[in-house]
Image (cartoon, helix red, strand yellow):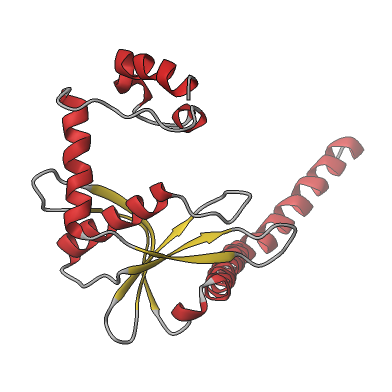
Amino acid sequence: MDPGFRGAWLAAMVGKASTMRFEPMWPWVLLLAVALAVVWHLFRRHHARVAEWRDRPAALRDAELICVEAQFRSKSRWPIVARVDRAYRLPTGLVVLVELKTRSAPAVKTSDVIQLSAQRVAVEDELRVCVSDEAFVIFPGRHSAPPTSRAVRLMSREQVEAVVARHRRLIDGLDRPQWPDSERICHGCGQREACGAAGERLAGVARRR
């Protein structure tokens, strides 16, 4: 037999034998990979639950987290579609809403109260539960500091419906928009274009204040 051919034949046989020995290991390798993925997923979930519990306001330490970033819709004349960051159920059965904000300073704005109040109407209508008059706004901590929570008092259902009705009248052109005290408020407003010429006419009044 030619030495070169014999060497190639021996190499092929050795490779085939190695493959035969390695093939039965594939199911075990795959099983190990799946097991590691499951363990990692469970670890991340546990870590997220611990972090979420640690960041809660003290008043919600014994509450049950019932939803995260869920959308609800009210049954009013002008339906409210609200996205809730978090909702908790106290041992008494009362539901408490939490809004997460990423501002640098832990300052609650009027828009936060309106947003949470609208969420309460939508949650109560869809889930048929009683939502607390008190909600929380949570701000992230800076430089590894713990988050800061602020309790807020929510508007009544009648007040929320009045705001929605005025919003509808503004869109339909039945009411005139009121120019804010600072034009910076308008920079991030989703209704800026809807104000249109009416807002521009009122801009001069605001600048002359």
In the rendered view of the protein, which quadrant contains the N terminus?
top right
State which quadrant residue 192 falls in.
Answer: top left
Q: Residue at 19%, 71% (x, y): give it.
A: 129
Identify which residue is drawn at 17% across, 53% down: 74
Left or right of 21, for residue 38: left
Residue sitting at the far front: 209
| Figure check: 36 above or below 102 | below
Instruction: Report whether 173 appears left or right of 203.
Output: left
Say above or below: 78 vs 187.
Answer: below
Count of number-bearing discs: 0
Which residue is most to the right?
3
Q: Residue 179 placed where, x, y %?
A: 37, 27
Q: Position of residue 107 (x, y in %)?
A: 55, 54
User: Which quadrant of the view contains residue 91?
Assistant: bottom left
**In the foreground, 90 or 64:** 90
Relative depth, front residue between 175 and 150 = 175
**At x 11% / y 53%, what residue is drawn?**
75
Q: What is the quadrant of residue 189 in the picture?
A: top left
- Residue at image point 50% right, 65% down: 150
Residue 68 placement (x, y as % from top left): 39, 61
Instruction: Name the one closer to the observer, 202 or 79.
Output: 202
Q: Viewer-proximal residue, 19 or 29? A: 29
Q: Position of residue 50 (x, y in %)?
A: 57, 75
